[in-house]
Structure formats: C-alpha cells, structure tokens
Amino acid sequence: MAAALALLGRAAALVTGAQRLLRGCGAGGSAEKCLSRGISSDERPKRPLTAYFRFLKENNSAFRQKNPEMSNMELVKKIASVWKELPASQKQVYEEARKTDWQRYKEQLAAYKAQLTPAQAVALKEERRRRLAKRRSFRAKRELTVLGKPKRPRSGFNIFVSENFQESEGISPTAKLKQLFDAWRKLSSSQKQPYLQLAEDDKVRYENEMTSWEAKMVELGREDLIRSRKQRPKKKTVETAKQAKTSKASSRETKAKLKLKKSEE
C-alpha cells in the first residue's frame, strides 16, 4: 500500500512538472511544440527556502510593523538574532517544512529534466553557465568598488563628451552621442589637443592612484588583485617624475582654457 502511494506521488509530480512546462508555452501549446521552440531556465523548479529564510520571510512584516524606524539591514540583523536564540523545538518546525519542500523539489526537478531533449539540456546548461559567470563578474566589480579601486583613465573623446553632453543636440542619449561623435571627428588636431592633454594627465593620475591602491591590497593580503608585471607601467625616471608633478598644473591650465573658450563662444 505504501509503495503504491509513493508511486502515485511520483506520478503526480511528473504531471505537475509537465503542466508547468505547458504553461510556459502559452495557452493551447502542445508539449511537442513547446520543446521544439526551446525551454527557458526560468521554468526550472526553484530551490526551497532554508529553515532560516522561511522564518525571515514569515516574520519580516511583523518585525517591520514593530520597528518602523529600522533600516532593512538593521531589521534583518534583528530577525537573525531572534532566530539564533530560538529554541531548537521551534526551529525544527521550519526545518521539517524545508525537508517536505525539498522532496517535492527533487520530484519536480526530475519531471522538468525528463521533458528536455539532449540539445535543450545542453543549451540550458550553457545558459546557466553564462548567468553564473555574469553574477560572478558583477560581484567582483562590486568588491573592487568597495575596496576603492581607482577609476580607469578617460580618453580625449570621453572628456569631450562629458563636457559637451548636456549642450549637445538630440532627443535621446544615443542621438546625443552620435552627434558628439560626428563633432569630434570634424575637430582639427589643434582643437582636439586640449582634450588629449587632459587624457594624458588622467593616465598619470590613474597610475599614481593604482600604485598606492595596490600597496594597500598587498597589506590586506589581496595580492590576487594586483596587476601582472606586463600590465604594470615601467618605473618612472627622474625626468618622468618631474613631468608627473607638472601634469596637474597643466591639466588645470587646459581646463581653464576650455572654459574660457566656451564662455567666449
């Protein structure tokens, strides 16, 4: 009897999985047509929440009402501290719910995978790999921002765009950029020179800031963030060091000339 009930449960899970796939195809779609068009990984069954996140989701509104002045971060910390002090018997309720949902998740996942052709399985695996790579890239960039990594130097064209974007013609950002690109191409070498000089000065700024930042990363034990020797600039000679000192002055002078020229126009 128990074995029969178990088989019925698995069959129901398979039917549920198939229905989820058909819903993803739209009204009136057949399984064959759906599979021929491909299946998105968005239709993949979602992993069930852990015991703690169940508690967090269930109690978030109540805690928010009692502590309206708290920020989201402060509220999460408070709920986490309450969960930490919760008796094991009360935590067990959330853990049992997780186990039940986990069993259901495994059955739905099996049903989902059973509907896929080999080609679809490969495509979904690749889609999942791209998503994870994109997520890792986002986290890496966010970490560098938190660690205060200097911004890369701007090109002469970038500086030209930033100083003229608001005044440029065009109803959309794309149209403005196109107009500025055309204007940049029409500038003579002498007209571009102030912007190119500012770009060179910005390179000096970047290298100086990177040298200081990398020294801090070494102190923090984050040598993995240091540029390779090929990427590092050559050590400055005495003459180069003198040029670096005067670059800031020339940069200010160039900016002043640009502002004066605009005001005269």
Image (tube, rainbow, N blue to C red):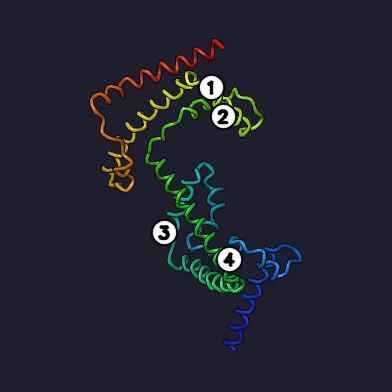
| Quarter of the figure that contains the C terminus | top right
- Single out the mark in the foreground, 4 or 1: 1
Identify the residue at horizontal 44%, vertical 61% (top origin). Answer: 86
Who is closer to the viewer here, 159 or 146?
159
> Residue at label 1?
187
Q: Indicate the amino acid at tag 3.
A: Glu
Q: Distance from label 4 to label 3 (Cα)?
A: 32 Å
Q: Distance from label 2 to label 4 (Cα)?
A: 47 Å
Query: What is the secondary structure assignment of the residue under circle 4?
Result: loop
Q: Which of the two labelled residues, at mark 2 and mark 1, occupies the earlier sequence position?
A: 2
Query: What is the secondary structure assignment of the residue under circle 3?
Result: helix
Q: Indicate the amino acid at tag 1.
A: Leu
**Are the two marked residues, 3 and 1, in contact with CB atoms closer than 8 angstroms?**
no
Q: Which of the two labelled residues, at mark 2 and mark 4, occupies the earlier sequence position?
A: 4
Q: Distance from label 4 to label 1 (Cα)?
A: 57 Å
Vertical position of residue 46 compared to residue 100: above or below: above
Identify the residue at horizontal 66%, vertical 30% (top origin). Answer: 171
> Residue at label 3?
85
Residue 250 appears in which quarter of the rendering?
A: top left
> Residue at label 2?
181
Q: Indicate the amino acid at tag 4.
A: Pro
- Single out the mark in the foreground, 4 or 3: 4
Residue lying at the far bottom of the rendered structure:
1
Vertical position of residue 6 compared to residue 251: above or below: below
